[in-house]
Image (tube, helix red, strand yellow):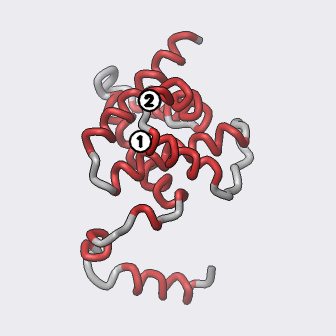
Amino acid sequence: MTFEHFSQLVDGMFPTDGSERYENLDVRELSPLVTAYVGDAYYHLFVRTKLLAYEQKAVRVLNEYSAKLVSANMQAQAYRAIEEQLTEEERGIFRRGRNVHSHAPRRSTSVADYHASTGFEAILGNLYLTRRFERLQEVAQLAFMASVDIIKAK
């Protein structure tokens, strides 16, 4: 992307505070990668906040555990653990997110787990963008507790 293209995007995105564009957003028309982008941000903050119940001083420890809990591998495992507790709509959102064409990064996770984590994040992003905050909190809590149980079992 050139600087000129970037400048045009910025000018188009931020002519005002953006709230009017967000208010009229039809989440069903968004790419699952966009909802996963939002879900990823939400889950990172959720996990970091939850970890404060266990540790308030050692930032290195907080960072280490939050990185483990939000990893693609752990999100995929957590999704599989909570799948039965999700609605059919949420499972459909997961499938769309999992199946969207994207490139898995070359890291320590499998392509399947990377795509599953994208599907999980798409669920969270969809719930956030449709303002179903109570259900969003429930799903994130289920996944967090499943992840904690998985870590304890190792």
Q: Is residue 76 above or below residue 147?
A: below
Location of mark 1 (residue):
43
State the count of labels: 2
- Quarter containing the N terminus: bottom right
Q: Nearer the viewer, residue 7 or 84?
A: 84
Residue sitting at 61 percent across and 47 percent down? 98
Image side of residue 79 versus residue 44, left or right = right
Location of mark 2 (residue):
143
User: Between tags 2 and 1, which lies in front?
Assistant: 2
Q: Are marks 2 and 1 in contact (CB under 8 Å)?
A: yes
Q: Secondary structure at mark 2?
A: helix
Q: Secondary structure at mark 1?
A: helix
Residue sitting at 58 percent across and 33 percent down? 76
Q: Given the current orientation, which residue lies at the most extreme top position?
A: 153
Residue sitting at 31 percent across and 69 percent down? 22
Q: Nearer the viewer, residue 153 or 136?
A: 136
Q: Given the current orientation, which residue lies at the most extreme front position?
A: 88
Residue type indicated by callout 1: Tyr
Label 2 vs 1, first from the N-terminus: 1
The x, y position of residue 125, in whole percent, is 41, 51
Residue sitting at 61 percent across and 40 percent down? 116
The x, y position of residue 89, in whole percent, is 44, 45
Distance of mark 2 from mark 1, alpha carbons? 10 Å
The x, y position of residue 86, in whole percent, is 43, 33
Q: Which corner quadrant of the image does residue 141 belong to?
A: top left
Q: Is residue 112 above or below residue 145?
A: below
Residue type indicated by callout 2: Ala
